[in-house]
Amino acid sequence: MIRVAVLADIHGNLPALEAVIEDIAAQQPDEVLVGGDLVGRGPCGKDVVQRVTDMGWRSVRGNHEDYLLAFRHKRVRSHWLTAPEWAAARWMAGELDEAAASTLEGLPLTLLSELAPELRLVHGTPRSNSEGIGPWTSHEQVEAHFSTVAEPVLVCGHTHRPRFPDPGDIPLFNDGSCVHPHSIIGIEIVDLKISLIKWYEHYNDKTQEKEIIKVILEGPTCLEKFL
């Protein structure tokens, strides 16, 4: 039985990532993929990059990787380097060390699962990591994006809005985000069955401790139903 987990849009949120790692250690998937935006918005970009690297998880490059790298290399409009409204971006770019920046520079825009080669992962769309797919995306647009890849299953992130199509619909999935307060959403594939899952914090009154609870939001659905 092959188990593949996909998460995306960690956005420098180290506590959320640690919650995922805790559950993944219990679930023991055979492969974990990250759909980009490891950094940006949150304060722990360097540590998130290092943690994902240490876990041996492969990742694609999101638009926030590009944003912070552009600030590091001063490839932005000159007034952005001093304007108050861009202070947070400058700080997050400066928070990255050379090792983290080098790792982000080397991330690909797309990758295939090694154990489930039917699955292609991108951050935004197959043509751009800054273009998103969400509820506003028409069926025709989804179809156009999907037609550009050879694989039968496409997973993206970026918009932070999960997408889990019905069997027979276009098999383009969005695995949500790791940055929502107290919960994390992702995609899990087990034995060629795909599910949309959520981890959330729960306070146990009996033990007086926080627990990480995992629930299935959609699925599991056999991938062959989408083919």
Image (spheres, rainbow, N blue to C red):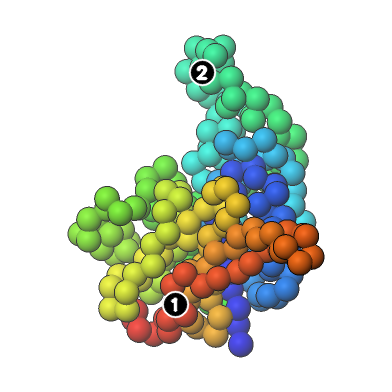
Residue 35 % position (x, y): 53, 56
Q: Amino acid at mark 1?
A: Gly
Q: Residue furthest left?
A: 140
Q: Residues within 10 Å of mark 1 (few under 14, many from 20)?
A: some
In-image side of 100 versus 141 (left or right): right
Q: Which residue position holds label 2?
A: 85
Task: Residue at 68% x, 75% y: name it.
Answer: 27
Residue 67 % position (x, y): 53, 33
Q: Is residue 204 visible?
A: yes
Q: Which residue position holds label 1?
A: 219
Task: Residue at 64% x, 71% y: name it.
Answer: 31
Q: Amino acid at mark 2?
A: Glu
In-image side of 45 versus 187 (left or right): right
The relative height of residue 27 versus residue 107 in the rendered view (above or below) is: below
Give 177 or 33, whichever is nearer the viewer: 177
Give 178 or 200, whichever is nearer the viewer: 200
Task: Residue at 48% x, 61% y: name it.
Answer: 175
Q: Residue furthest front?
A: 206
Residue 133 % position (x, y): 35, 53
Q: Mark 1 falls on what kind of element?
A: strand
Give 106 or 35, whichever is nearer the viewer: 35
Residue 20 % position (x, y): 66, 60
